[in-house]
Amino acid sequence: MFKKIQIEIASFIARKLNRGKIVPFELVVSEIVAARSGITGPDADFYRVCTYKVVKETVKTCIGKYKANKKNQDQLSLPGFQHLQIAYPVTRNDVHMLVPIDQLTDGELAARADEYESMARGCRDHAREIRGYIQARTAANDNAPAKREAA
């Protein structure tokens, strides 16, 4: 059932983006919860609170797929581009939202490019540290775990 909810929310977001709409995070949560507001009975408040929490986390996960990372890159790419996405998450006036690329400002796009450059530097530094660690371990101890495993 949870997978069905994730698919529904992801489809809801995709439909809005395909129509060129900006997708405010909280608005998605509100609209999804409002569509299922027919909860009645003495425990209705409890179920509404739980529903809101689960929907909010699921929306966060779905919008998170548009954040800077390698996962889901292919399905989110703008047609004709290998990496450029159809939308990016930004914060405007303290409101978190997913904005179609053609509606992002040059400043917002430049900030995203800077974020990717920073990630690339971090990954290169990490790789360099791993290689340095291997070299130092090998030089300090010819009986390193990697050598024992190979034997």
Image: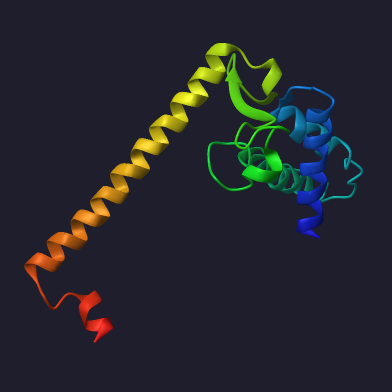
Give the image location of residue 50, x and y in percent.
Answer: 72, 48
Please identify the residue farthest to the front as the structure is shown.
80
Q: How many marks?
A: 0
* Residue 61 visible in rendering: no
Coloring scheme used: rainbow
Figure check: 122 above or below 106: below
Which quadrant of the figure has residue 17?
top right
Give the image location of residue 94, x and y in percent.
Answer: 58, 18
Q: Quadrant of the N terminus?
A: bottom right
* Residue 101 visible in rendering: yes
Which quadrant of the figure has residue 125?
top left
Residue at 27%, 82% in the rendered image = 149
Give the image location of residue 79, x and y in percent.
Answer: 73, 33
Give the image location of residue 39, x and y in percent.
Answer: 88, 46
Q: Is residue 110 left or right of residue 61?
A: left
Q: Quadrant of the C terminus?
A: bottom left
Which quadrant of the figure has residue 10?
top right
Q: Is residue 136 left or right of residue 4?
A: left
Please identify the residue farthest to the bottom as the structure is shown.
151
Residue at 40%, 38% in the rendered image = 120
Nearer-the-camera pick, 97 or 120: 120
Nearer-the-camera pick, 57 or 145: 145
Nearer-the-camera pick, 86 or 35: 86
Please identify the residue farthest to the left as the structure is shown.
140
Residue at 64%, 40% in the rendered image = 60
